[in-house]
Image (spheres, helix red, strand yellow):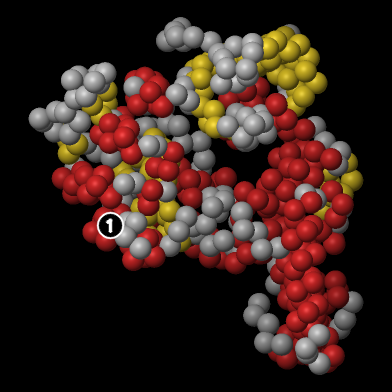
Amino acid sequence: MAFAMKQIDGITVINNSGKVVFHAKYNPRFSKDSTFLRDPDKNLFELYPGLQPEDSTLVECVKNGKRIYREDQKFYDCNGNLINTDNVTLPIVKGGKVVGAIELSRDITSINDLAGDCSDEVSVGHKDGKSYAHFTYGDIITQNKVMIEIIEKTKIIADSISPVLIYGETGTGKELFAQSIHNYSDRKNKPFIAQNCAALPESLFESLLFGTVSGAFTGAHNKPGLFEIADGGTLYLDEINSMPLNLQSKLLRVLQDRHVRRLGDIKSSKIDVRIITSMNINPVDAVHKNILREDLFYRLNVVGIKIPPLRERRDDIPVLVNFFIRKYNDLFRHNVKGIEKEVFDMFQECSWNGNVRELEHVIESAINIVRDGYIHFRDLPVYLIDEMEEKMINVDKENDIHSLSGVVEEVERKIIKRSIERCMGNISQTAKLLNIPRQTLQYKIQKYNIKI
């Protein structure tokens, strides 16, 4: 085997439907006591609710039937604690068919491991030129014109060496774009290293980013930093606004000189790294609030990308809903056919503060309850129902001060607009859906100045 795990903290076995058939935990990070569960009768994502299907090495192993070594995996346990593991994942084959997978895990959540062993582990993982960027443009589910324009724009600049700054609210898919840019570029077979700046304490940030030499500080060893590990590929820094200001100046120097110097070293090394950064707050506001250095902003924002929130691209909701239903039907072996009209109408009115990620979690939650048929209002998370009821109360209060004719016209305008979006701009289909003549619909579209 290419490597030997220093210790095993957990063993998990699943069958090909995602059910956990054996689970053993040895590390207090996972459980206060060592536990051994045979046939715990839980789905993998019930055991670890913070783990996403696309991030699970067990799910990937069952799907492709290949061994996976040392995949860095981050997820939240049932208590809400962040867990970071290295894994060896092997398919279980019977009669030439993959019937499950077994995974041996080592917990590397300790920040000391993160500053030390993590650098070696990531480096080893990339010696074969493998990219940890799993997503491509094909994974971006959209029919929205603005999103399609963004995709085309980022494809054009994919091979450039210029930095990219992606701005978007939480859950809009910033890393999805970052990985897609990398995989579309000529660096696709080189490392893609991702780091969330908000997840690191200031005391370890510099050593992880730039590396260390022996003697730089007590316990320091010769360790490459993320820049060296990503050499030839892409370094993605999420929540760059969380980086301390003093380190921002050092990052700026590296970007300008294309040389990096390890902590405690007297010489620097030339690097070839494409930098992609992202923020979930407006970068201009971050500069004004002295969170982001102005000179660094200009250097990072050579190519600026703004991803619109879901509430500004509601025409994507139908295709996203269908995609997530198919995804979780396959995962849970359910047969949900779709959502009821009342649910679709509700989705079109939701604020979606968590954006696409929130929509996905809502669908996942519902499919845990519904095994076949359609998702009803009652199947949705309680918080979402409460939010919509509060919104309707506020609408009713506003309507009390308007004339009856004004209220009727506003309701009619919303229904027509929503129906046009549902029919993707097809006037004939919209008229049929509303059960009115096509000419009447065209008149009302002009009357209410509805954009198609």
Which residue sits at x=25%, y=34%? 210
Q: Nearer the viewer, residue 97 or 281?
A: 281
110 w.r.t. 55: above or below:
above
Image location of residue 331, percent across then percent down? 73, 33
Q: Residue 314's quadrant in the figure?
A: bottom right
Q: Residue furthest left?
A: 266
Asked whether residue 71 appears in the rendered view, the answer is no
391 w.r.t. 204: above or below:
below
Asked whether residue 119 appears in the rendered view, the answer is yes
Q: Which residue, given by chain and number where applicable, does mark 1 sit on?
A: 293
Q: Nearer the viewer, residue 291 or 296?
A: 291
Which residue sits at x=81%, y=92%? 403
Image location of residue 401, percent across then percent down? 78, 88
Image location of residue 285, percent across then percent down? 39, 65
Local packing at callout 1 (Cα closer than 10 Å; few below 14, some 14-19, many 20+) is: many
Image side of residue 76 versus residue 361, left or right: left
Which residue sits at x=65%, y=50%? 358
Q: Residue 104's quadrant in the figure?
A: top right
Image side of residue 25 versus residue 420, left or right: left
Image side of residue 18 versus residue 142, left or right: right
Q: Element type at marker 1? A: loop
Q: Amino acid at mark 1?
A: Arg
Image location of residue 264, percent across then percent down? 16, 28
Quarter of the image for the C terminus: give it.
bottom right
Which residue sits at x=14%, y=28%? 265
161 w.r.t. 111: above or below:
below
**Tally of marks:** 1
